[in-house]
Image: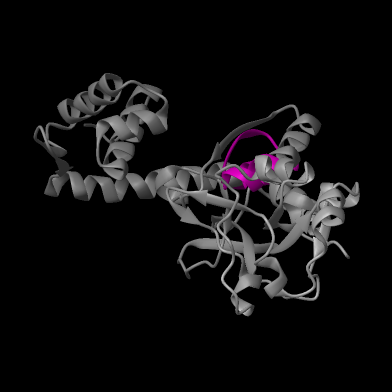
């Protein structure tokens, strides 16, 4: 290949397909990331191998891995693609208008209720901004999965190449409807909870236990309802079916409207941090900076613990 040959979009697409296949470990997974068919990815990689005159992958019916030549080429390609991305960020940094596609991963429930509305409002204010939002409770690999930004619940490991910002902490609280408390009485101690109806979150046979009950000495009665949908738990509590223990941001509206009442507010509950995570670059793009700023401003109020 001559050094002065022009890299056409077709050639660059072959390199992108090759890197995606190497990162994902299969053509099928790479196709999902690139929004292509598996055969399209295979054809692009095949044309790249034919042009280079080398085999980039060892492929069998059960596995796929890079050849020695493929590994060396992969290292060069990832550096080139990273440099191209950095160059785009540097150029777009000259314009303060958020534009282009922003890919964000977030936990399902807080993503739907708190994060997505903020990003949708941001997109409405900036017509050139395009969003691709993924809702999943699993931790994503931002670089391998191709995300610009992730919202992560829980404590983070120290990962090189990533930047983080604390959005706030999530605390849980016990709540019940005024009608339920009028009928069954208001618990004053953790032991009192053992005599009440519990509405609990559970998934795959695992219950999310209440921290307050660990302080008591009596065994609680079995929960009346076990649901894997927190929104329905809030509805059940508002209808007077029992007591719930949920994150404060999830019940804030119900508390503000008087549909629910906080119980045992003097009891501290474990705090779960909520972070923003993004790849560390020298020049974050305007779209990334705008998303981070918008989420920091919005969640400051959303994660504030309501006063009893």
Query: In which quadrant will I find the C terminus?
Result: bottom right
Most distant residue in the right direction: 257
Tell me which colouring the rendered structure shows: one colour
**Along the viewing direction, whichever of 91 and 283 lies nearer the viewer:** 283
Which residue is at 12% across, 31% downward?
53
Which residue is at 37% across, 50% downward?
79
Image quadrant where residue 306 sits:
bottom right
Which residue is at 81% across, 33% downward?
125
Question: Left or right of 82: which side holds 166?
Answer: right
Whether 279 is among the magenta residues is no
**Along the viewing direction, whichever of 122 and 82 lies nearer the viewer:** 122
Residue 227: percent from the left, percent from the top?
57, 44
Residue 98: percent from the left, percent from the top?
71, 38
Whether 94 is among the magenta residues is yes
Image quadrant where residue 126 sits:
top right
Residue 161: percent from the left, percent from the top?
47, 62
Residue 208: percent from the left, percent from the top?
54, 59
**Along the viewing direction, whichever of 280 and 60 lies nearer the viewer:** 60
Question: Magenta residues, as a range?
Answer: 90-113
Q: Is residue 196 above or below residue 203?
A: below
Query: In which quadrant will I find the N terminus?
Result: top left
Please indicate, yes or no, whether residue 7 appears anywhere in the rendered image: no
Please indicate, yes or no, whether residue 187 appears anywhere in the rendered image: yes
Q: Is residue 207 above or below residue 155?
A: above
Q: Is residue 14 above or below residue 269?
A: above
In this figure, what is the number of numbered marks? 0
Which residue is at 61% across, 65% downward?
210
Question: Left or right of 296: which side holds 56?
Answer: left
Q: Is residue 155 above or below residue 5?
A: below
Question: Left or right of 251: which side holds 226?
Answer: left
**Along the viewing direction, whichever of 299 and 179 lies nearer the viewer:** 179
């Amino acid at each position: 290949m001559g050094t002065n040959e022009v890299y056409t979009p077709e050639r660059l697409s072959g390199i992108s397909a090759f890197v995606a296949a190497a990162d994902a470990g299969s053509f099928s997974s790479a196709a999902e990331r690139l929004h292509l068919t598996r055969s399209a990815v295979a054809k692009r990689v095949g044309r790249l191998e034919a042009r280079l005159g080398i085999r980039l992958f060892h492929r069998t019916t059960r596995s796929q891995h890079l050849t020695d030549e493929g590994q060396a080429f992969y290292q060069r390609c990832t550096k080139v693609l990273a440099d191209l991305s950095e160059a785009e960020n540097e150029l777009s940094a000259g314009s303060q208008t958020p534009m282009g596609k922003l890919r964000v991963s977030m936990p399902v429930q807080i993503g739907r209720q708190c994060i997505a509305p903020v990003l949708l409002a941001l997109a409405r204010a900036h017509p050139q901004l395009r969003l691709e939002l993924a809702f999943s409770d699993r931790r994503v690999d931002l670089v391998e999965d191709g995300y610009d930004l992730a919202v992560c619940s829980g404590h983070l490991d120290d990962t090189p190449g990533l930047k983080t910002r604390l959005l706030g902490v999530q605390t849980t609280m016990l709540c019940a409807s005024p009608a339920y408390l009028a009928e069954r009485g208001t618990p004053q101690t953790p032991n009192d909870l053992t005599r009440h109806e519990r509405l609990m979150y559970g998934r795959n046979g695992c219950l999310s236990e209440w921290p307050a009950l660990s302080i008591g000495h009596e065994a609680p009665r079995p929960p009346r309802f076990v649901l894997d949908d927190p929104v329905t738990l809030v509805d059940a509590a508002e209808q007077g079916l029992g007591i719930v223990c949920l994150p404060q941001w999830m019940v804030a509206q119900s508390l503000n409207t008087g549909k629910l009442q906080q119980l045992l507010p003097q009891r501290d509950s474990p705090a779960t941090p909520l972070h923003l995570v993004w790849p560390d670059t020298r020049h974050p793009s305007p779209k990334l900076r705008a998303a981070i700023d918008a989420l920091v401003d919005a969640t400051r109020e959303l994660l504030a613990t309501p006063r009893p």
